[in-house]
Image (cartoon, coloured by chain):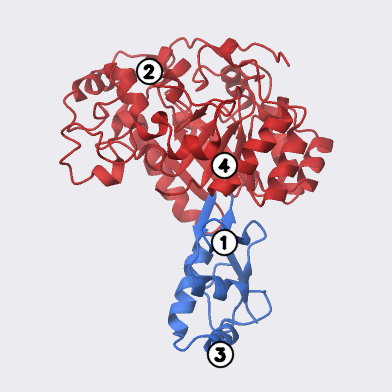
Chain colours: A blue, B red
Amino acid sequence: MSTALRLSSHPGLSPHVRLAFDRVRERHVLLGPESVLVLNPTGAAVLKLCDGRRTVAEIVRELGRQYDRVVGDEVRDFLARLVANRCVEFGDD
Amino acid sequence: MTSPFGLLAELTYACPLHCAYCSNPLNLADYRDELSTAQWQRVLTEARELGVLQLHLSGGEPLQRRDIVEIVHSATDLGLYTNLITSALGLSRRRAEQLRAAGLGHVQISIQAAEAAESDRIAGTPSFERKLTAAHLVKELDWPLTLNVVLHRRNIDRVTDILRIAEELRADRVELANTQYYGWAWHNRSALLPSRPQIERAETTVRAARERLRERMEIVYVLPDYYGQYPKPCMGGWGQRQLTVAPNGDVLPCPAAHALPLPRASVHENSLAWIWEESPLFQRFRGTDWMPEPCRSCERRELDFGGCRCQAFQLTGDAARTDPVCHLSPDHGIVVEAVQAANEAARPREEELTPRPHPGRSV
């Protein structure tokens, strides 16, 4: 937990949060203890791939198939912020 | 207009504790006619349709409702994330397991001080050891745990010990919230308001602990409004993000707003959507059009929304004035005076507190 997120890390959602689709806002949301994060479509796409098995590098590659322009650093920064909020956990090889 | 994110469901005002800073209304007898299970289920359904995602189950003591498991079950089915805000009295292993199975997302347990005797004295009932037992149970059942402590003059010097307890309990979050001076707390304000050196020491402790526990525990620290330069954006703005439903079905933009001389809104009479979107109560202080100077021309008007309407009413008798905690408020002298009194050298650390008498359950 204390090391930085790397391309070889395997991120997964913390067991305390839930990824859900809010029909009212027509957005995916990340729900945790007393917190709501409304996600944009790219953020939702990243989190759907965070299954604790794929590496960050694999997630970036997979997103590249869905979207024209995927910047690896942006994906990693997004996930690192969620790690800091304790919404995402990760393991390393 | 934005959709609300959170609903604070005050299921009952019945409570086994007698805290001298209780934030519930003074006239509890008016709230004995509580919503039924089916009525709460309708409120939750309407809340989800309106956009609510977070349900905060509170009171009083929400575990005093016999239908709490059923209510949680309905909330889970609707896709709401559920938070139980409890004294932990009544959280037996059996009840906890039922709530876990019903999908309860998170448990927040209060303690009143850093050690049993003082915590029990403030709570007005032996409870500290039971709270710790319940907190262990919460972790054992793999729930996220928040430890909540209301801070004031008598316990704020023990923040280090409070954080040590939180660490031992493996709490995921700690909320150290200084007392808000409404309701019963207003009566005890002079005995509860800390001095400036007390506040500064607590802040230093919290800063160091945040650094040390960064990846293990989130520490929420709420400064007393009276020591802030600017007011807080109360509830994220009136009718912007949150709503409260009281035990009798009254709907409020903030749990303290029952005290304001405004038209009522109730789930007995209207849908939650109408109340949120159209009711005079929710329109009254929404946005910035209602603002007097100095708020109206202030560059912070969309940051703090003029502060807390209930505090403005409590301190000036007019809910439409700038929150007097703001140093720009023409009424700021009222707050300066209270702060000066709290900082007089001769002021004892422990003045007498008047505990809150709490009636038992009536339903």
Q: Looking at the image, which is closer to me, B276 or A77?
A: B276
- Asked whether the beta carbons under mark 2 and mark 1 sit within 8 Å of each other, the answer is no
> What separation in Å lies between label 1 and label 4 (alpha carbons)?
24 Å
Q: Is label 2 on the same chain as label 4?
A: yes
Q: Looking at the image, which is closer to me, B358 or B290?
A: B290
Q: Residue at x 47, y 48 (%)?
A: B3
Q: Looking at the image, which is closer to me, B248 or B61?
A: B248
Residue type at mark 1 is Cys
Mark 4 neighbour density, 10 Å: few (under 14) some (14–19) many (20 or more):
some
- Asked whether the beta carbons under mark 3 and mark 4 sit within 8 Å of each other, the answer is no
Quadrant of the rendering where the N terminus of chain A is positioned: bottom right
Mark positioned earlier in the residue sequence (1 or 3): 3
Quickly name the residue at label 3: A65
Quickly name the residue at label 1: A87
Quickly name the residue at label 4: B164
- Asked whether the beta carbons under mark 2 and mark 4 sit within 8 Å of each other, the answer is no
B40 with respect to B344 (left or right): right
Q: Nearer the viewer, mark 2 or mark 1?
A: 2
Let me know if residue B344 appears in the view.
no
SS at badge 3: helix
Q: Chain of mark 2?
A: B
Quarter-of-image position of residue A46: bottom right
Quickly name the residue at label 2: B261
> What separation in Å lies between label 1 and label 3 (alpha carbons)?
25 Å
Let me know if residue B313 appears in the view.
yes
Residue type at mark 2 is Pro
Q: Residue at x 84, y 37 (%)?
A: B94
Q: Chain of mark 4?
A: B
B271 with respect to B343 (left or right): right
